[in-house]
Amino acid sequence: MNKIAVILISITIVSCAIIGAALLINSDNFVYLDSTPPSINLISPANNSIIQASTIIDLQISDSHLRFVEYWINNETNELLELPFDINTMDWTDGAKEIKIIATDEESNTAVMFYSFIIDSMSPAIIVSPDNNSLIRPGDIITLNVLDENIESSNYSINGSYLDFSSQMTFETDDWSDGCYNILINAIDKAGNKAITYHNFTLSTQPIITLTIGSPQILRTIDDESIIYVNGSTEFNIFSSSGNASEISDIWFRIWNPGHPFLGEGPGVHAQVIVKGGWSSWINYESNFSFSEPELPLTYDERYDDLHHIEYYYSDIYGHNNTVQTLSVILDKYGPDTQITPYAEENYPVDINSNTVFNMTAEDWTDGSSSPGVGFNSTWYRIWNGSYWSSWIKYTGNFTLSGPAGLYYIEYYSVDDFGNMEAIRRADYNFNPN
């Protein structure tokens, strides 16, 4: 006779039969109850890490009766995940990503895990000012900056020495020497994105040109303004007074002359304000010049005495024109104007006697008559008494004539402070002592 016993072992109900003294178990009749959820583990990268797109998210998911695995990105999209349970982030956009993993087994046991990552596929932005290959001047400012929300580290070198920096760097170049400067900037962010930038600068002290005035020159004050007087032989020199003179390719100048009849314009962008009838053309400066220089585009008669303006600038090897500078002078190449009383002219004698008092006055004005001359210095005269000339006498005050009656000549002239002498004049007199 067969007996059937029901035995509860763990959570499985089995049937058995007793035959003779033996206990037989029929395994086909076991029923397994599985309440253990699948296991989910993140292998790499670390949770909450910053990664580049294309990084593989490696998961380990295990269960003896695993049915399926699915995952969500920011609770918006979901996909099934197949062995080997890797998530490829190849096309993911930058930004924060929350990954939800759900693993389900055959008994509908589920496991849920959440992981967070920041996708960053952008290399750091390196900003350098001024632009690469710029010409800079002492005192110009160079700035370095690295922009990246997830920056890990950055460093720079100037001509070879490396230093770390974490915020914008500013370099003042006042004390830098002329020369080439090579700046290398490295940056890496927490996702491993790298950036490297090379910048080259040429620092050159900008040339300054100066116009100097040779001799003779005299400084006068007219209407509370200092004015330099020159004459026809005074030389002007334009030269580099500081800075890198090798940058200068050409020096140009022009002259405003009150009697010059035509207009002139400079080369390039230097078409300056033209005073009608005044400016010469721009002249390429090669050596010292004076107002008597025959190569200047002015005839001698057009070089009127009066106020003159000289404008000058240089062109550099970089194609730039320097700022135009101006110097004003008064040209005085003629002597004073002397008047004698009683007035007489050559070959037109005037009657006089021993009581006639001679007086001489001189004024020094520029030939243009709008500016005073450099200044009267002295007047000289001599007398022909019918037989011989006296020596030249410096006029110091009124005088009279003495001697036998006859035709007398008085020659006279004046000299200014430059030594400019007026043309000798002659006055004729019929002298009668009584």
Image (cartoon, grey):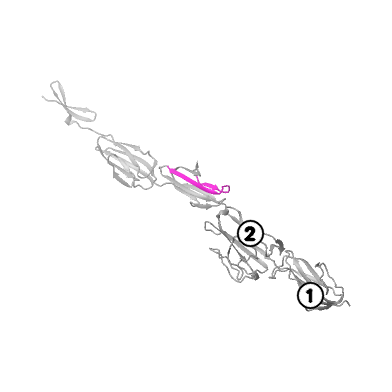
Identify the secondary structure beneath mark 1: strand
Residue 268: x %, y % from top left: 53, 63
Q: 347 or 140: nearer the eye?
A: 347
Question: Looking at the picture, which amino acid does disc 1 mark?
Answer: Ala
Residue 391: x %, y % from top left: 81, 68
Outermost residue, right side:
434
Residue 37: x %, y % from top left: 29, 36
Q: Is residue 179 magenta?
A: yes
Q: Which residues are magenta?
A: 167-189
Residue under pointer 1: 427
Marks 2 and 1, the one that precedes in the sequence: 2
170 is higher (above) or lower (below) than 391: above
Residue under pointer 2: 237
Please indicate, yes or no, whether residue 258 appears anywhere in the rendered image. no
Q: 161 or 430: nearer the eye?
A: 430
* Quadrant holding the C terminus: bottom right
31 is higher (above) or lower (below) than 339: above
Give how far apart the Cα atoms at labels 2 and 1 are. Answer: 44 Å
